[in-house]
Image: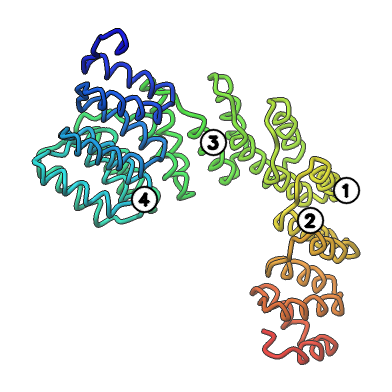
Amino acid sequence: MLRRGLKADSVTLCTLVKGICKEGKVLSAVQFLDKMTEEKVEVKVPSYSMIIDSLCKDGLMNEALDFFSDMIHEGVTPDVIVYSCLIDGLCSSGRLKEDVRLFDEMVGRGIYADVVTYSSLIHGFCQLDLWKEVTRIFDKMVGQGISPDVVTFTILIDCLCKRGMVGEARMVFDLMILLGKKPNEFTYNSLIYGLCLTGRAIDGAMRLFQEMHEKGLKPTTVIYSTLIGALCQAERVKTAKGLFNEMQTCGLSPDLCSYSILLNGLCKNGQLEEAMDVFRSIKSAGLETNIEVFNTLIDGMCRVGKIAAAKEQFDEILKKGMVPHIVTYNIMINGLCRNGMLSEPSKLFLRMEEEGCFPAAISFNIIIRGFLQENEITKAMQFFKEMRNKNFLPNEAVSLTLLHHVLVNKQCQTALESLPNSL
């Protein structure tokens, strides 16, 4: 265009910048705008705001701030949209000191913050759990006659739920509706998550879920997964399975997280056959199983005494090129001990160390308790000695079991006396 002697106007320039940013080439957009500036083409605020917004969303905050400085240097006065983009980006990056400085600078320029700016600030302070600052900013916003929108309310509800203040979150939710603000999928998701987190309000969460349907809102995979997990925890596995099937009927494809949650619920509730069906479904869906999925399945097998099957899955981990981590070993050692197979935990413990996966306090507690429960005092004391040499302490269950054996078993008493400050 320039080679033909044509000069781009600000509208054309803005359209071109928007197109480049949409393609995910924000740095190319920066170079393009720099060239236009060199060619003395007038660049207006919307072009700058698009690039700053894209840089912020890509996490390139330093570049966004540098570009903002260039904008000021070129004599272009930023508007509330530019500041809001930067404030939101800084909040997401946890750079709240710079955020507040930028907010004060904006006010100092006589630019009034809007609901988007305030919501970004509130979100930033919520992420750092600075509730006093959240309420201060919220009060300031309302005091300036700015009405919170659905985003602001959702941020507050989400923050309150994560702080365990579900009752207060529900009050904010009700106030939101009273003020004529319509909750969206994210609002419901936050409140449903909060209710499920308490472990006592699953029925309330299910009522909200039903309310979503009645209002024509489509629950997301995250909402389904949250409810499925809570139902499994409440031992309402049948309802959880029904919800999992409903999710697929509604056209949502379960992700690995959804499958893992249901798998865990089935395993914890002793429904191993159905858990195996879910495990096979993961493969059928073309999803890659990870070590956490194997850990869940192995634990489920150990819980119902299927040690041979658990060993097969443990070997499958190695065949897939995965590396068992400490949780995997602890699950296997615990399963072997609980099922009285005491010749194998010691070997697995040794193998664990040889593979560079060093046992933690919980590993020692599991194996010592297993040996003590089967009255294998000598082996238990060998591991207890090693545990103390590594400066690990026994947990309450192991301590009580040891004390019991000390009272009735001289061998245990002698071994314990040889270790200073054992308990």
**Disc with the residue nearer the chain's start (2 vs 3):** 3
Secondary element type, mark 3:
helix
Secondary element type, mark 1:
helix
User: Three-letter amino acid code at disc 1?
Assistant: Ala
Residue 268 at x, y = what percent?
67, 47
Q: Disc 2 to disc 3, how far (Cα)?
A: 27 Å
User: Three-letter amino acid code at disc 4?
Assistant: Gly
Q: Nearer the viewer, mark 3 or mark 4?
A: 4
Q: Nearer the viewer, mark 4 or mark 1?
A: 4
**Disc with the residue nearer the chain's start (2 vs 1):** 1
Image quarter of the C terminus: bottom right
Q: Residue at x 44, y 42 (%)?
A: 193
Q: Residues within 10 Å of mark 2 (few under 14, many from 20)?
A: many
Q: How is the image coloured?
A: rainbow
Residue 165 at x, y = what percent?
35, 52
Q: Is residue 350 left or right of residue 51?
A: right
Q: Disc 2 to disc 4, how far (Cα)?
A: 40 Å
- Residue at mark 4: 94
Residue 90 at x, y = what percent?
32, 45
Q: Disc 2 to disc 1, how far (Cα)?
A: 11 Å
Q: Which mark is residue 308?
A: 1
